[in-house]
Amino acid sequence: MRNFRLFCTNLLGLCFLFSDSQTEGFGDSGSLPPTPNISHFSDKQSLGVSWPRNQGASERDVYEIQISRTENHTIIYNRNVSISAGDSAQYTWTWLSDLPLECVDHSVRMRSFCHQTGPSPWSNWITNHGTKARDKFKIFPSQSVLKEGSNVMFCCVAPVGVNITSITFKDMPYPLLNIGDGVKAILVSNLAIPTNLIKILSVTCTDSAGKTSSVGKSVSFPPQRPRNLSCTTSDMINIRCSWDPGRKRDQYDRNNQTQTLHIENTDQAPIPCQSSSCIFPAVPQRQEYNIRVEVKDQLGEEMATYSFNISDRVSPVLEWDRVIPEVTEVSLSWTVLGNLTQNNFLCQVSVDTETISKQTLRSENGLCKVRLEGLHPNMGYSAKARCSVNGRLWGKWTWPVLFTTCPLVTLDLWRRIDYRSDSDIRRVTLLWKPHVFGRATTVKIQAYTVKWSQEGQTLTEPMDSRQSQADISIGPKKCNFTVQAVLNNGSSIPAHITILPKDNSEIPLLKKSLNKTSAGGFSLWWDERTSVTCGYTVEWCILGGSASCTLQWIKVPKGNNTLFLPPGHFKSGCRYSFNIYGCTEHGDKLLEIQTGYTQELRSVKYPSLIKLVKSTHASVTLEWHYDEEDAAQPAFITGYLVTVQKVQSDTAPVLFNVSVGDPRQKSLTIEGLQQHQEYVCSVSALTKVGPGLPASITIRTKTNYFSHLTKILTPILLLLGCTALLWPQRILLKNVLKKIFAYPAGMNIKTPEFESFLNEIDQKLQSHKVEECIGCDIEVMHIKPLWHESTILRTPEHTNTMCSPAFQPSLPPSCVPLQTGYCPQSTVLLCERPIHQQIMCIANKSYLSMIAEPQEVEFTEIRSSFEKL
């Protein structure tokens, strides 16, 4: 019945339009309202409104549209829509609802504004009816998949007379929104995809009676536009298109997608595809393709387009045919599948992730071949290849193919020649070192073969695999040797060496001493020779060792004249000799010899047989023996150090320290010594790091008798000369001496009496016992002294002051404090006062024995009997 009324209304509107076909526009009161039609899309919650174009419409028409809800027509939306006039006779406008259209009735009406006049009357309400519930709840939106990040309104439509009390989402209650009679809703913002295993979200409605109704919803994201869409063919029969689908979906995502490919420039039906690729047959006789890929799901759709020429999109597919490895090369071949008509391909071959070949290959019946060089022997590799038709589009790499190159053994060959002085026969010792390259497989040497040819004769001698040298006697002529290893699989490169003819001419060799070492090793260098055509060989050996020397050698390529030997195989304090050979097409020739140490030591031997060759009263000449060229020495001898020291004491200073700079000079004269004196002379060898152990000898210089005779004769001759000169003046000299040695005027001193007096006093002083001994001063004076100038007895502390006439206030004249102890008597000293006082002093100093109390000593004057009357 409702549809019939709608049909009648539309029919009436058409009649008014046709009856007034001559009208230019709408009048203020006679204008007819537009007649809208509505349709809804529940999956998008959108309401579509369409209406016919007015006749005589202006270039831009304006319409006012209103949308209401429920039967009461509560207006929820009002908008003016401006539409440009066009060729279309029908206008369409879409409105998106936040509430599912099924929840409640939605009505639309509209009116128009033409030629800037007043609006036309409103059209009748056109209603899109909501869903009515009869016996149970209905929950909307009805679609099971919701868009991630969207805001969704869930509504519950209850049967008539039922009151909804709550709506929950994920078991959480939300505030209720009253939409209309029996319709309640909730708003959930920013939906998120669950991270747990259960992806279903529940919406539950509960009425006042406690009855519930629930539905499950899932959250997903809409389809994404295919990216990097491209198409290729490997055989011109099938075309394969691929793209990047974008965000990866969870395996439990219920938003199922469909991918469809459309060839737009053909009438072929759409082609269903996989999620990221699609294969379809090529259209016969068609080169250009325009394709469209559509991706659809419950939340929307996306598409991408691509155009190409099939001839430019050929991607060859390869299949390995054969792999033939050799020692340093490998031969690869493969087949190009698809029966492509092209014969020339640009191909790349990669070995162990490194592209080592890029070349154009010609296919013979679809087969391509390539040979790679520069590989290492006995080593595992993996190879892969790809080809292109035009150099722009490359096919996929093949699966890697594994292979191992063949083993290789080389021999480092050298020789040592021993000459016999009495014969032309030479003894040649061949020495070799095997070098096995790579470790991919185990290489076993079964034997060695030694061949040599001399004067047209060729001899062969097999050697055991455990041997590394061979002794062969040859004549004086040129001889060629060849040594080759015999393997169980693989090959060995023969090693050649030529022995020059015997040359009896003596050509002086260049000999060097290595004065500098580098970090404990040897840095060798030599002058380049233009005659050398195939490099140099350096051999070395320890000199002076007790055991036989193990010869070592190393070969240096042509153009190099330096070599560094690391310290790993050398010892400190050992002298090494390096022989440098130059290689020519005729053989190896010795060029120079270099000797040196990695590190010199001071512990060199001491000189022997030191002897005194010549000796004088002031010099000695020493001579010693020393082998400065001894190879067993731990350092080069640079000279000698001679020291001279007196024998009197071990700590006596070194008088002489003389260095001899020439190690071949083994004698030295030392001058500046003292006569008739013993000396210790030491001689030690000098090195760059200091002197070695010394050897010593004790010598005595001779007596200088001429010097003693000079000392004796000189005063005698001087005395005789003076006597001879003064003899004529002897009388005058006698008078002068008398005046000098005569007694002063007024003194009458009798010498014998004075001496007797002194002896008597001395005997009295010595007769006292120790405990009776006192110290005294005796003064013999010509004049009578005052009391404070009298002679006093002194204690031992004051005995150092003799014959002092001065007054001493610290010592009273009546007594002197006495000290205990014992001291041997001092020698009796005589001294004289100045002449004007004429005092003679006799001092006897001794220690006094202990007494109980200090005593007073009276001082009396002792006059000499020699006093002048």
Image (cartoon, helix red, strand yellow):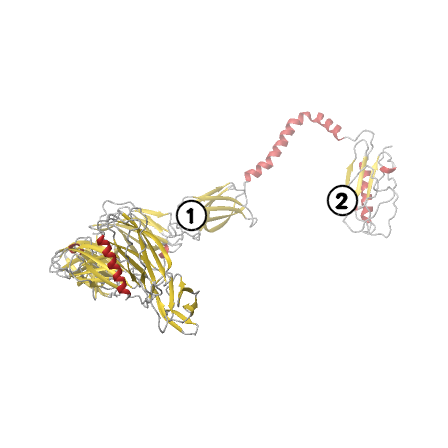
Mark 2 crowdedness (10 Å alpha carbons): few <14, some 14-19, many ≥20: few
Residue 378 seen by the camera: no
Residue behind mark 2: 827
Nearer the camera: disc 1 or disc 2: 1
The reply, left or right, for residue 64 in relation to residue 810 is left
Callout 1: helix, strand or loop? loop
Image x and y of residue 781, in percent: 84, 36
Quarter residue 566 falls in = bottom left
Residue behind mark 1: 688
Residue 117, disc: none
Q: Nearer the viewer, residue 600 or 853?
A: 600
Callout 2: helix, strand or loop? loop
> Which image quadrant: the C terminus?
top right
Image x and y of residue 104, in percent: 35, 64
Residue 808 seen by the camera: yes
Quarter residue 755 falls in = top right
Quarter residue 667 falls in = top left
Image x and y of residue 578, in percent: 32, 51
Task: Find out whether the residues at labels 1 and 2 contact each other: C-beta distance under 8 Å.
Answer: no
Of mark 1 and mark 2, the one earlier in the sequence is 1
Callout 2 amino acid: Thr
Callout 1 amino acid: Lys
Image x and y of residue 77, in percent: 36, 56
Q: Nearer the viewer, residue 745 or 361?
A: 361
